[in-house]
Image: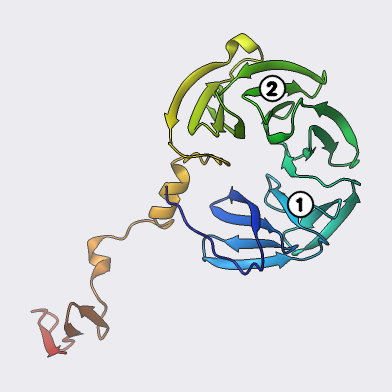
Amino acid sequence: MAAEVIVGSYEQIVFGYRVCPKDGKQFVATGSKDETVQLYNMRTRTEHGALLHHDGHVTSVSIHPSGKLALSVGTDKKLRTWNLIEGRAAFTKNIRQNAQMVRWSPAGDKYAVVVNEKVDVYDLESASVVSTFSYRKRISSVRFLKNTLLAVTGDDEHVQVYDLTSEKCICEFKAHENRVKALDSFQMNDVCVLVTASNDGFIKLWDFSAERQEAVRPLGQVNTTARLTCLSVWKNSGEEEKSDTQPTTSQPDMGSLLPPKNKRVRIHREEVIVEEDSSSKKQGKKKKKQKVQ
């Protein structure tokens, strides 16, 4: 796994970013104080485009699981849906509040919008609120563990998990000794692993395989000795790495690696011309001319 620093054409502060690995392609979407959303293609190491319709600071962006849509919120009190295929605004909703965060559900049929201590869960088709949850303090991170389970944390040491069907908190546990700043999760076999990061410098992994508080148990932790403010988990499936390192076509045999006649190949500091002698097929003689550069 490699880390890269992205330098974009921003005029002011970058508030956050989102990485979307999809079908062997990787895009980074960033939101900034200069009212723009920038898209970067990590394959070509180039800017993919800019989305410019916000009239205020862009505080959060989220890419749909399909990689075809994106959501963004900001200080213009708008929730904007973007068509990433055509690079244009697809839909704008006036939410009448400055949202700090937006996140898609795993199935892409819902999304969560965070405003201070409140989380509104929207249905994609109707664009209406289907669930609302309130946390006791300002929310710092949310994460869909499943399509019907939402993990929420704020400016304290705890994590709460809400069931979108019953609209109730089904689990709460103390995760750190200091404020939890970020949440993420991934599936490992049949186990949902919740990852938390805190101001205390620790990154912790939790087993959330069952929907009961007693089932949440620590799996491991690491002390980074840093004041953590954000977290993103990338699970290497192995298949993507294999596709990156191996060509899709079958491997040629050694005979196919021989240069064709009259083709120049460069070997270290020598330029070699290989020619077949068509006049002597039985002996298979070859003439070689060597030119040292």
Up the image or down, 230 lies above or below 281; here it is above
Compared across the picture, whether 191 is left or right of 10 comes to left
Residue at the spot 59% in from the left edge and 50% down from the top edge: 19
Q: Nearer the viewer, mark 2 or mark 1?
A: 2
Name the residue at 65% across, 12% down.
Answer: 212
**Splitting the image into 4 quarters, where does residue 169 fall?**
top right
Query: x and y percent of residue 142 in the render?
Result: 69, 34
Q: Which residue is mark 2?
A: 160
Disc 2 to disc 1, C-alpha distance = 24 Å
Number of on-image labels: 2
Q: Between disc 2 and disc 1, whose residue precedes?
A: 1
The spot of residue 260 in percent (x, y) is: 27, 78
In front: 98, or 39? 98
Q: In the rendered view, would you say 288 is above or below 183? A: below
The answer to whether residue 69 shows anywhere in this view is no
State the residue position of label 1.
72
Nearer to us in this view, 235 or 31: 31
- What type is the residue that disc 2 sits on? Gln
Q: Quadrant of residue 270?
A: bottom left
